[in-house]
Image (spheres, helix red, strand yellow):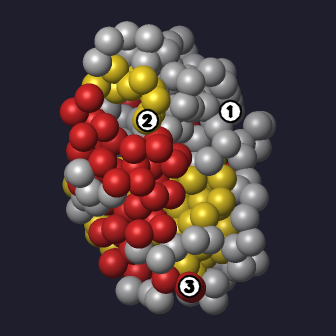
Amino acid sequence: MHDWLTPQWPAPARVKACVTTRSGGVSVVPFDSCNLGDHVGDEPQSVLKNRQRLVSLLGCKPAWLRQVHGIDVVEAQPGQVLEADASWTVKPGVACTAMTADCLPVLFCDRAGTRVAAAHAGWRGLAGGVLEATLESLALPADQVLVWLGPAIGVQAFEVGAEVREAFVAQHAQAAEAFKPSQNPGKFIADIYQLARVRLAARGIDAVYGGDFCTFSDPRFYSYRRSAQTGRFASLIWLGS
């Protein structure tokens, strides 16, 4: 599967997960090559072929979402494109799917391997509570939840305005540690991984893994900040039979 990633975390054997990269598809510049986003200007047939190839390689049924930087969570429904930014399932073979290109994809499972979820968390969704909403949809005790933070924009590249810092710090004082002053007046460098960990910790979730990527600097991934016209890669999680 080319250079696609398998999350390194202590999930049960029944829990399957994969993160695609730019490699392995048929899309041409600037979407080269495995663009899975059907809303970015790529040829529809190329996106369809890329998605079909993903299904063939992984053997699961992805539930694609129409992501809007919100906090709605739905049950994953292959064959339907629901408007939401997170999904969950208890059905084997159904893949909860988050598409990103700098935003944070977050995968969830329980220690028993009976349910999984995936969330798309840009800063707006993260501040709005998409991770908390996803946890609520799983309806699990905090000590039974495992979380993996997928490829997102790294701390050296994520410059934001003061309003972003204020949105997080107003909710969790410790979020202030995730922001450092930028060289540009009134701007801050934000650590989106740390912001996610702060919010998860506030809900009692301490089994959090991943968070060591940077989509902006790593050419394996699409990055909206690096190139505004670009594709989307996918983070998927599903239950084996």
Label 2 Cα neighbours within 10 Å, binned few <14 / some 14-19 / many ≥20: many
Q: What residue type is labelled 3?
A: Asp
- Residue at 39% x, 16% y is 228
Compare marks 3 and 1 and give the one earlier in the sequence: 1
Q: Nearer the viewer, residue 120 or 45?
A: 120
Q: Which of 48 and 142 is in front in this view?
A: 142
* Residue 72 disc label: none
**Left or right: 83 with respect to 136?**
left
- Image spot of residue 21 (x, y percent): 63, 35
> From the viewer's perspective, is residue 111 above or below residue 11?
below
Compare marks 2 and 1 and give the one earlier in the sequence: 1
Q: Is residue 56 visible to the viewer in this orientation of the structure?
A: no
For disc 1, the marked residue is 24
Q: Which amino acid does label 1 sit on?
A: Gly
Q: In which quarter of the image is the N terminus?
A: top right
* Residue 179 disc label: 2
- Residue at 45% x, 65% y is 200
Give me the C-alpha separation between circle 3 and circle 1.
Answer: 37 Å
